[in-house]
Amino acid sequence: MSAAKTNGSGDSGASKATEKTEKTAKAEKISVSVVGGGAWGRALALASANAGNDVLLYTRRSGVAEDGVRVTASLADVAAHAHLILLTVPSPVVAEMARELGEHLDGRHAIVHGVRGLVPSARGDDGDLGTIASVLRAETPVRRLGALGGPALTEELHAGAPSVLVVASRYPEVIAATQRALANSAVRVYSTDDLLGLEWASALTGLLAVAVGFAKGSGAGAGLVSAFMTRGIHECARIAAAAGAEERTFLGLAGFGDLFASIGEEARPEIRLGEALARGEDLDATLATLGQRVEAVELAPLVSAFAERRRVKAPIVTTIASGILARKPADDLIRALMVEPVGGGA
Amino acid sequence: MQAPIFHFNEQREELVRAVVERVLAEARDPIYLLNDAAYHEIRRLESTGGRERDELPIWRKLARTLGSIDDPGARKLLRDVIEVHARDVAGKFDRRVYMFANRVLPASLSIFLSPQVLVQNDPLYLLRGGPLADRVHTGGPIDRIRKLAQLGTVVYVPTHLSNLDSPVFAYALESTRLPPVTYGAGKNLFSNPILSFFMRNLGAYRVDRRLRHEVYKHVLKAYSCILIERGFHSLFFPGGTRSRSGGVERKLKLGLAGTGLEAFVRTSRAGRPRKVFFVPATINYMLTLEAETLVDDHLKEAGKARYIIEDDESTRFGRINAFVRKLFQMEESCVVRFCDPVDPFGNKVEDDGRSYDARGREVDPRTYVEPVLGRDEVVMDAGRDVQYTRELADVVMRAYLRDTVAMPTHVVATAAFARLRAKFPNADLFALVRRKDEIAIPYVEITAAIEETQRRLGELEAKGEIVLSPAVRGATGAELLKDAERAFDGYHSSPVLRTRDGGVALLDPRVLLYYQNRLAAHGVAWGGGLSR
């Protein structure tokens, strides 16, 4: 831990004083490590520090600083600092990061990730999709795993505005620890034991957000956008259920909650991508302009193929995969969805 | 060093006492537990006949007493109830019978059942165990398991197809010089005239699956846990009951096997950690003794299938005799394959008893039972352990698939059933199994289909996803067909396959379904007949 340097507002003397008052006021101060210095990781680290915890943030970027959060570039420090680790790296680097981190972890650690995405299953050839938790399970000795999702927006969380998160874990202990790590006067942390459901919901709402952006960009009215979202959530819930998730998770904060948040968030890359595609702009050019990875681009065809293999009807996801991202004209796509046979469930 | 089971009888009284003390100490609400026991027992006894009914007045009286009893009084009563059940559960181990039964198991069955066999064969030759070595084959990391049995308690969790599984497994342990095990056997098996002989004497304790009340569950759990804590190697069938479909278990509740983890937690907490090693295993038969009863039960309308079957082939002398004859006639007719040992958290365990994660890094099992937040100490946490156990069940199931041994009967049934489905593409499961002796598949076609199945299995084996029995590896389609026919011939109550007029007639699709189901979870055989 010696390599960790203190960042943020106070000098070491002042932070010690703060520590003392915190200790007397709240006996249950805990240690938390956050891995990933992106906007989301920094927001979580700050929320945890605001909850009065001793937070260490791992990042390879330079110049990252948050109030009351120490920063390190050593994974050994991360493991030594806390048994609870929040992981917020982009999904393509999760495996590599986990393997490296795994060198320092043991069975006592818990990892709670806030990564949106699914990965092709380890077997690779069966068209199945694996969750981030399954990657962590394969790459580290850690069993006590969890995930964060829900409607909290990075900027709002970072600004200390009232925010709502959901933590999912099959381990009650992990839920309790995450709540202690993050809940403060401005952050509420709901919980579910449907880890798989939350992971699928986080990934698939990202997909649906592209469709929502696309519908908005095509000039669809509020009624149609709403229909899109509702049918989309139900469709995604069915697909995820085929993977073993609970459908009802999609109907709560991790599904609907997350998707509703995305329409309000104009800055969300999925929405902007959908809108740009609706205007007929080029996919690669748009992605370059966004300067950000959009998970949905790679995920859509995988999810569509998964649904087909499991014989789940998925017109919206298929439209996203083979229509929107393939830049077919917006009007044609909406028309095609409108002539889909109407099922019983509304 | 001798396995603890050899000293079981000396410890038996003390063991019962330890069970009683633990269950009593951890009983939070004795009146509730007594009420629960009385309620379930009265309900059960009212609907049974026979001598058991004599217990009815005792329970009724107990139920009446509970209204006016204080806590100390209830604890005293509870102690009695616990003790009665603990004694009922406790088994007896007879070393001489163990040695005897294992050396001669199938032979003794034949001798026992059929005087002709005794006359025809030299009994001393059979007793030497020579011919048996060729019959029950064993495979897997046996040397490692033998080492681990010295370092901790081994908990075996094999697949479950037949009532012969436990004697066969006990034989496999003896023949590979692995220490014997204790295990819980269904109480109904003790009333089976043939099996009870082995059950009583192989270190089995009795599990009465009709008893549903909590005191009994606590007693069973405590009993099994204390055995593991004390180093008694144990055997559990985590499928709970024999696979009705013939398929490899796809859903496991580790149930009592979960006490392996509890034993590790308790001993670690007490500062004398007892390592616990789980060893999944597959028991593979060319023929399953009770195939017909099981598959019939499987095919019955949902919900009507019986959990406990008391009148199957394993209760009939003639059938067991026929089965044993088959066992002697065929090479490789039964294979017990041990899988890689794992710790209670699913980590691989090496010869030295240390645990390694999926990336080969050593990890101390104790760290899994220390809290994420809080002090460095081992804590009991039921919610946590339920999940560890669930994840262990997944590890066990994957091991089952990898170590399933494909036999000629499975391969031939898979190919034959696939041809049957091709002939009736629109038929559902029930329509298919009714197609008795309706089609004959041209010889060339069936042998080609068998070879195609064999080729696909070969690909899976190359990826480490299944094991082919030597009889399957490298054999021609014709040879496999002949092996399977020879195995089926005269064993099942009605013929399964018959070669005639240049074709193979499918006489009993339901038995074919049963044997092909063994390969269904691997995606090689049809999966539509597994669950309904």
Image (cartoon, rainbow, N blue to C red):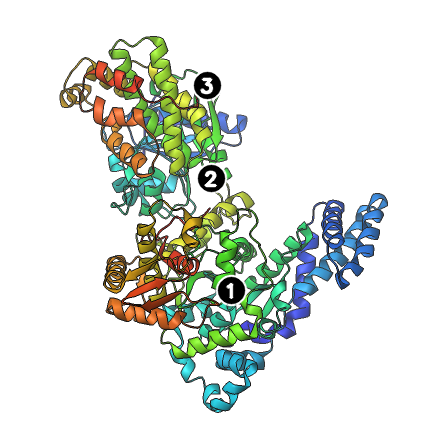
Mark yes or no: residue A229 visible. Answer: yes
| Left or right for B318, reference B279 | right
Amino acid carrying mark 2 in the image: Arg
Which numbered tag is attached to residue A186? Answer: 3
- The local secondary structure at tag 2 comes to loop
Question: Are dots 1 and 2 on a single chain?
Answer: no
Task: Tell whether label 3 touches label 1 (CB within 8 Å).
Answer: no
Please rate how many residues cluster around mark 1, counting C-alpha atoms within 10 Å: few if below 14, some from 14 to 19, many from 20: many
User: Does B306 appear above or below B174?
Assistant: above
State how far apart marks 1 and 3 are (Cα).
53 Å
Along the line of sight, which residue is nearer the eye, B268 or B481?
B481
- Residue ID for mark 2: A170
Q: Mark 1 lies on which chain?
A: B
Amino acid carrying mark 1 in the image: Leu
Along the line of sight, which residue is nearer the eye, A104 or B30?
B30
Label whose residue precedes the other's in the sequence (2 or 3): 2
State how far apart marks 2 and 3 are (Cα).
26 Å
**Closer mark to the observer between disc 2 and disc 3:** 2
Residue B479, position as x, y percentages in the image: 27, 71
Residue B427, position as x, y percentages in the image: 38, 46
Amino acid carrying mark 3 in the image: Ala
- The local secondary structure at tag 1 comes to strand
Q: Mark 2 lies on which chain?
A: A
**Closer mark to the observer between disc 1 and disc 3:** 1
